[in-house]
Amino acid sequence: MSFYWPRAESISKDPHDLAFAPIWRAKPKVVVSRTLPDAEGARVVGHRDLAAEITALKEEPGDDLLLTGGSNLASALTGLGLVDEYLIVVHPVVLGGGQPVFLDKERLGLRLVESRPFDSCSVLLRYEPAR
């Protein structure tokens, strides 16, 4: 992501990429890592107490936090009870394999709150944890 999105207009002509790149660049970034000391254009957390660091981020004023990528991190945050909602974008691409999004074997209780098609290529599913 840190290579592609800052340069998307010079790499891609896809209208989705061209529309998303400026949005991505405008948002502040936080990288969660146990080993990375710093990241260009981003704040790094995760070296100490993940629960405390993410809770502190959630309490800061501003927009909601959005996790992209990492199923390990998604599972860890889910296990810590730090996920308020799940936004899952489904793209009609068959890859034939891959890693599950949630690594825990325990079934998550989720409630569908919204479904929104973006175009003929993808749909957003918004879930809240069932409480």
Image (tube, rainbow, N blue to C red):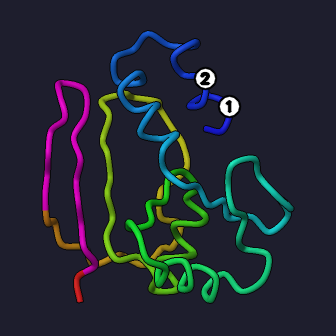
Q: Which label was assigned to residue 7? A: 2
Relative height, residue 106 to residue 43 (above, below):
below
Quadrant for the C terminus in the image:
bottom left
Badge 1: residue crowd in 10 Å (few <14, some 14–19, many ≥20): few
Residue drawn 46% across the image and 31% down it: 21
| SS for callout 2 | helix
In front of the other: label 1 or label 2?
Answer: 2
Q: Residue at x 33, y 64 (%)?
A: 86
Is residue 122 positioned above or below 11 on the image? below
Is residue 120 toward the left or the right of residue 107 in the image? left
Neighbour class for label 2 at 10 Å: few (<14), some, many (≥20)? few
Residue 93 location (% of width, % of height): 37, 27
- The span shown in magenta is 114-129
Q: Quadrant of residue 114?
A: bottom left
Tell me which residue sits at (60%, 30%) in the image: 6
Q: Does the stretch in magenta take in 121? A: yes
Residue 35 horizontal side relative to residue 59, left or right: right
Q: On the picture, is 9 further left or further right than 32?
A: left
Quadrant where the N terminus sits is top right
Q: Are marks 1 and 2 in contact (CB under 8 Å)?
A: yes
Q: Amino acid at mark 1?
A: Phe
Residue designated by label 1: 3
- 1 in relation to 113, above or below: above
Q: Position of residue 46 (x, y in %)?
A: 72, 73
> Which residue type carries mark 2?
Arg
Residue at 43 percent of width and 77 percent of height:
61
The image shows residue 7 at horizontal and vertical percentages of 60, 23
